[in-house]
Amino acid sequence: MSTVIEAHRPGMRSMLILIGAETKMVVRDTAGLVVPLGLPLLILLTSASAAGRTEIVNGRTALDLFVLPLVLVMVTATIGIINMPSFLAYYRRSGILRQLAVTPASPVMVLAAQAIVSLMQAAVGITLALVVATLAFDANPPVNPGAAVGVVALTTAAMYGIGMIVAAVAPTPNSAVAAGLVAFFALGALGGMFGGRGGLPEPLAEIGSRLPFGAAVDALSAAWAGTAVEGGQLLSLGITVAVGATVAALLFRWE
Amino acid sequence: MTMNTSDPAILAEGLAKRYRQKVAVADVSLRIEAGETFGILGANGAGKTTTVEMIAGLRHPDRGRVRVLGLDPRHDRTRLRQVLGVQLQHAYLHGALRVSELVDLYRSFYPNPRSGAELLELVDLGEQRRTVFEKLSGGQQQRLSIALALAGRPRVLILDELTTGLDPRARRHMWGTIEQLKQDGVTILLVSHAMEEVERLCGRVALLDAGRIVALDTPRGLAARAGTATLDDAFVALAGKEPEDSQ
């Protein structure tokens, strides 16, 4: 007599339940939820009136060309650089992946669910900022929407790339948050997060424009204005994605 | 994948594992038949957890071979996870999820899971079903991790420290659950510090010391072999040390 053991992998229903579980984890982590949605919105609210409604180019105002790009880049940067590495560090340290390893679920499934939830959070943050800007401050859509969507996608990849570097080098959840915050504020400050790069000393402003945060803001601004996005900016973002992926592949450890 | 019912449920041959300079398991061989409840006793550092982690496929042995229901934990992982339930020594679960949410999540991994209500009843956690994992006591977290190990109706169950840290009432409830699983024909490998538990639940016991099996017998046989009245005394006589608590 013999018995048959079927190979069975968790299916789409299990994936949806896992995505639901990861969503609850994100929603119940108040700080992780509020910072990426609230901080950019705060910048929007405090800068929008001052930016004025004077047209600069192609019917687009300072709000469209400077404030909105900065706000959208901040959403992706907070999620990619601060939230994502701290979640990864938490999963590693708490042994959740090890616990799941004794079930039919795979670590890849868990990480895919986590990535999907993280991208949904970024989408919510971007939508929220656009809706508030449009309804409350008469913001205009980008002259070149295709370029804007492309730049946002590349920026998101670049910010996750920086996040992967943080996750690879930070040993604990606390140090991941600390390293993520430092990276976020350093890149953001040089990229014009605090009142524009015009106020920075020339060499710092120059460096800031070449780092991914500043390059992303400039590229998104160009897409909004309908002018050509500079190759150098796309190169900066592309290099960040490549470096992030390489460092993560070489240094990141599950345990 | 088929297995003959004459195959042992768990077969371990010549297992060895070292971490850097430290030998955790020197040489362990076990043959556990289907339906058996088998205990592993040993002092801290005797190699109990490393042994069961190799059997569960969480660690790769440096030497030796493991088969669970005829499956190789390394190459037949997908099949093995359907039929093997594992409770780790410490529970690691999503901290912000409620008990019922974790139960539903782990149930979703299996094709024919036990119901959530049944799982919570088995470990007596019905009243905590809306509590988030972080807010559970250590003993409650441990009971939840046992419930999750039972979600897929496993035919083989590995329990690392079943009742360490549980209060007497929870301990008795858990023993009742294990006896129920035994009647259902589940093969159980139990790592324990509690002699009373092993005497009550296990048909055979292996005593580990310094990564080797120093005695393997029924609980009564072990005591007789050591010339002592209780398993507790037999442990001290055979292992030469006290069965200390791990926490």
Image (cartoon, rainbow, N blue to C red):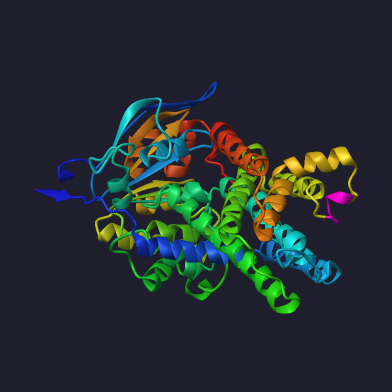
Residue furthest top in the image: B21
Assess whether residue B21 is covered by the magenta stretch.
Answer: no
Q: Which residue is drawn at 76% across and 44% down?
A: A209
Q: Nearer the viewer, residue A54 or B195?
A: A54
Q: Which of A43 and A246 is in front in this view?
A: A43
- Is residue A31 depicted above or below A161 in this figure? below
**Number of marks in the rendered image:** 0
Where is residue B198 drawn, in percent x and y? 40, 49
Where is residue B159 drawn, in percent x and y? 41, 50
Instruction: Say if residue B20 shows up in the picture.
Output: yes
Quadrant where the N terminus of chain B is found in the figure:
top left
Q: Is the magenta stretch mostly helix, strand or loop?
A: loop
Where is residue A202 drawn, in percent x and y? 88, 41
Magenta range? A194-198
Residue furthest left in the image: A1
Q: In this view, does B95 lie to the left or right of B162?
A: right
Where is residue A38 drawn, in percent x and y? 73, 67
Q: Which of A22 and A43 is in front in this view?
A: A43
Assess whether residue A197 is covered by the magenta stretch.
Answer: yes
Q: Which residue is drawn at 44% across and 40% down?
A: B41
Q: Residue at x 56, y 34 (%)?
A: A246
Residue furthest bottom in the image: A135
Q: Residue at x 43, y 43 (%)?
A: B231
Instruction: Say if residue B13 shows up in the picture.
Output: no
Q: Is residue B125 left or right of residue A122?
A: left
Q: Is residue A61 left or right of residue B145?
A: right
Q: Which of A109 and B205 is in front in this view?
A: A109
